[in-house]
Image (cartoon, rainbow, N blue to C red):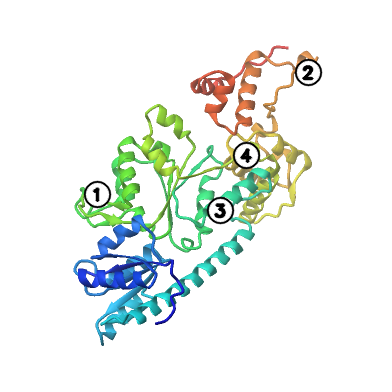
Amino acid sequence: MPEVTHTNARILVVDDEEDTALLLRDVLRKRGYQCDAVLSGTAAFDYLRRDPVDVVVTDVQMPGMTGIEVCQQLYARYPDIAPLVLTGYGRLDIAIAALRAGAYDFITKPVKADTLALAIDRALEHFALQREVKRLTVEKIAEGPIEGIVGESSAVRELGHVIRRVAPGDATVLITGESGTGKELVARALHSLSPTRRGQPFVAINCGAMPAALLESELFGHVRGAFTDAKTARDGLFLQAGTGTILLDEIGEMPLEMQAKLLRVLQQRTVRPVGGDEELPFEARVIAATNRELETEVEEGRFREDLFHRINVVAITVPPLRQRTGDVLALATSFMQRAAAGKGKFLSGFSRQAAQLLMDYDWPGNVRELENYIERAVALSRGSEIGVEDLPTKVTEHKSTRIEISTSSPAQMLTLDEMQHRYVRQVLAAVGGNKTQAAHILGIDRRSIYRRLEATPKQAEH
């Protein structure tokens, strides 16, 4: 009897004949494996949702889901699990079909205990080697820059560190941040740095851009005849994403009626197309993004608390550009080079005064605003560099939000309205745009912050 080298391995036997399933289970347990048995492919995947295993040993001829289909589903949904197939003696055609479906090996019946144990050990060693290769690949990826994430500020370095830690996993991610900070870029980075999902589809949808009925069809798909224009069946984005990633952008604006349906989908990991009665499993990683403070939305009844906890498994906050002042010129240069190349221009950079204005501006619209202004500047530029005259008035005439009260010059003094306006923005900048925290510091409610920011401060009359 060969020595068992993988005594901690977890094995699941799948066979519709109960006597066979239990016999194989007991044989493998006696050899030191942790082993359970189920009687169908459906029961196997119910088991895998609860408990991880290393190897699945499945019979081929089973009612309902066959062993070939079990291998296909394992390959798509659980690529780190090694499938082994039990086939009748002489059925080479079935063995070949099983290998094509993703099986690591096949064992002919009647099953010999030594042969099965040897096949299991080989599968464990092979998949352990695959995991090590994957780990080394992840480490290599972690050494390089993240595409689309530009800058060397401490805030961006910390963001990159979090992205690299989260990307290899499968947990649902909630990306928060102000409008224009680059939340979709972070989602794409998580996708491209995943060793199992990069190369697979990345699909995104703005959850606040369409009514609930249309959003349901877009996300979950529909069957033929589900509504007037449904002349053919169509997969929704959850299925179109395959084993890739789906981004639910602006999830804070999703209608409440859709929130309940999405919660069920995330809990069950299945979707039901509009007009259909069949639950279809999906394997895509789910990433949600919002510029709203969902805790406040929950408190005010606009967002379901249970859905919030379901999507907030891993939270990533994208810093606003005002917290990345050291990155402004690097970003501006990147946008300038891309825009100039598109227009067939050559620009060496920014004049010293223009660069200083860019760094002094508060960038309430964040990276998106900077990109738009640089594209405009490139279009207007006539020299070899971007100068002050190429920048918009909002930048060139900007006044810092920082409050200076040490002046003795009446010409530099502020009205109370303007001082209040600037102080509110200064506090917001200090807390990273968190209006709930800013309201607590200021001793006002969140609605008052909006009113004070929207009000135009009166200028002092000198």
| Distance in Å between CA atoms under marks 4 and 1 | 41 Å
Q: Which mark is residue 321?
A: 4
> Can residue 211 be seen in this snapshot?
no
Which quarter of the figure is the N terminus placed in?
bottom left
Can you tell which of label 4 and label 3 is closer to the viewer?
3
Amino acid type indicated by mark 3: Arg
Which quarter of the figure is the C terminus placed in?
top right
For label 4, the SS is helix
For label 3, the SS is helix
| Distance in Å between CA atoms under marks 1 and 2 | 65 Å
Asked whether the residues under the numbered discs 4 and 1 touch, taking CB atoms below 8 Å apart as contact, a structural biologist would say no
- Say which label, 2 or 3, has the lower sequence index: 3
| Distance in Å between CA atoms under marks 1 and 3 | 37 Å
Q: Give the residue at mark 1.
A: 274
Asked whether the residues under the numbered discs 4 and 2 touch, taking CB atoms below 8 Å apart as contact, a structural biologist would say no
Q: Give the residue at mark 2.
A: 406
| Distance in Å between CA atoms under marks 4 and 3 | 23 Å
Left or right side of 201 for 411: right
Q: Quadrant of residue 380?
A: top right
